[in-house]
Amino acid sequence: MKDPAGRLRFITPPAPLDDARYVIGRALLLVSAAIMALHAVSVVVRIRTRPEAGALADVLALLNGGHERSLASWWTAALLVTCSVAALLAARLARGDGDPRAGRAWVVLAVVFALLSLDEAVSLHERGAEWAGAVFDSGSVLARLGWTLPAAAIIVVSLAALVPAFRAIPSRSRSIIVAGLATSIAGALGMEVVNVLLVDAGARYLWRHLVMAIEEAAEMAGVVIALLGVLTTVRVSGTDRGVALAYDAGR
């Protein structure tokens, strides 16, 4: 633009920091990839050494994503907590932007993410395996599917109940969150079914743990995608006083 003297000069606008959201996403995906690499190493070491007990066996169990209380499950739980905190931030910004309906919807989603994190941390869904074993014949495929059957039913009911909340949030954010949840659900339920089929077919340990690795990786990637979906509503910009946050409703 021109200054009063008529000379041309360029004025740099305030730098938007929106890309920071995607930097966060890339960093989280890299950490997830590192955790899955450690899972692969633990599987190979276990196959070669076959430790029965001791420190090595404990470390391998911690790194093995196929175990419920492993580094992978703790990381997924931490990501879900981050989603919950980000949703609460979006709720506060939405209310400040004059959209209380969206604010309430984000609070609902924050609660859902928190409950999912709790389930991941303490393996509540494993109780479903006991239920399936009590209801179905122990030798049937349905019994071997374990927790996937009650989990699928709970997911369907939960998603139906969340429809009003999804309608209240921006469409771009909604699409990304749904894509992330779909990735996690497909990985968790789909790969669990594949694993049951591999066990029935007498597949080798390595193949079963490859499926487990895909399951854990899909869960992590899906949660990261969902987190990015929440963060799309948080507009970050640089000001003279530092960093400013605002609600991005996509208007």
Image (cartoon, rainbow, N blue to C red):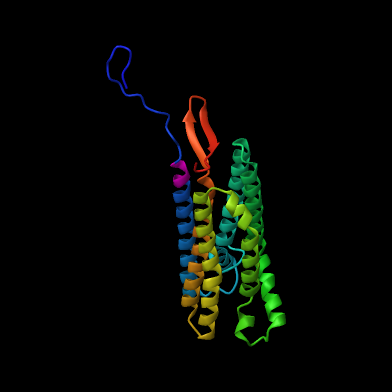
Total marks drawn?
0
Front residue of 221/157: it is: 157
Residue 20 covered by magenta stretch: yes
Residue sitting at x 62%, y 36%: 96
Residue sitting at x 64%, y 45%: 101
Magenta stretch: dominant secondary structure? helix
Q: Is residue 158 above or below residue 13?
A: below
Residue 194 covered by magenta stretch: no
Residue sitting at x 59%, y 58%: 74
Front residue of 80/232: it is: 232
Toward the left, the furthest residue is 7
Q: Is residue 228 visible?
A: no
Residue sitting at x 72%, y 81%: 134
Q: Is residue 39 visible?
A: yes
Toward the top, the furthest residue is 5
The spot of residue 23 in percent (x, y) is: 44, 45
Q: In the drawing, does residue 150 fall left or right of residue 14?
A: right
Q: In the drawing, does residue 108 fall left or right of residue 72?
A: right
Q: Quadrant of the N terminus?
A: top left
The spot of residue 120 in percent (x, y) is: 62, 61
The spot of residue 142 in percent (x, y) is: 62, 82
The spot of residue 119 in percent (x, y) is: 66, 61
Front residue of 161/199: it is: 161
Q: Which residues are magenta?
A: 19-23
